[in-house]
Image: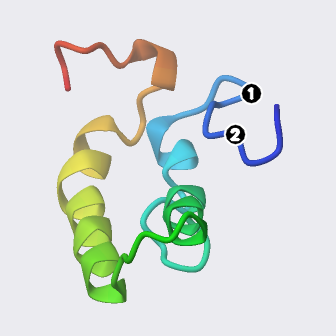
Amino acid sequence: MKVGSLIASKPMTFAEYAKDWWIYDKCAYVQGKLKRGYKISRTYVDFERANLENHLLPYFGKKKLAQITPAQI
């Protein structure tokens, strides 16, 4: 896997993939946006993390990424 890549290099669950997603100091997406000059507040990131934990992880958490279809999203 390429360093900094957001693509999974091995079969994994959505929960494994999203482990650091929307955690301000760990999320590759947030860090990339900040490095490119975008302003993303910690409040926004915390809100999005709560959405992930409350809505997406309960439904998709145990599913392998390859099993998630566009229709499910």
Residue at 57% over, 46% down: 16
Q: Quadrant of residue 46?
A: bottom left
Q: Is residue 64 above or below residue 18?
A: above
What residue would you read off at disc 1? Answer: 9
Foreground residue, 40 or 25? 40
Count of marks placed on residues: 2
Disc 2 residue type? Answer: Ser
**Residue for badge 2:** 5
Identify the residue at image location x=26%, y=66%.
48
Above or below, 12 against 50 in this view is above
> In the image, is 20 to the left or to the right of 41?
right
| Image position, residue 31 (x, y; %) | 58, 67
Closer to the camera: disc 1 or disc 2?
A: 2
User: Disc 1 marks which amino acid?
Assistant: Ser
Marker disc for residue 60? none
- Image quarter of the N terminus: top right
Q: In the image, is residue 69 above or below residue 55?
A: above
Tell me if mark 1 has few (under 14), some (14-19) or many (20+) residues whose alpha carbon lies within 10 angstroms of its own: few
Question: Relative to the observer, which residue lies in front, 53 or 8?
Answer: 8
Q: Is residue 63 left or right of residue 7?
A: left
Q: Position of residue 23 (x, y in %)?
A: 48, 73
Residue drawn 46% across the image and 38% down it = 14
Q: 10 Å neighbourhood of mark 2: few (<14), some, or many (≥20)?
A: few
Within the image, what quadrant is residue 59 found in?
top left
Which secondary structure, mark 2?
loop
User: What's the distance in space between the residues labelled 1 and 2, CA to CA?
Assistant: 9 Å
Q: Nearer the viewer, residue 46 or 41?
A: 41
Report the quarter where the C terminus lies.
top left
Apparent side of residue 71 relative to residue 69 in the rendered image (left or right): left
The residue lying at 30 percent from left, 13 percent from top is 69
Q: Determine whether 47 is above or below 52 in the image.
A: below
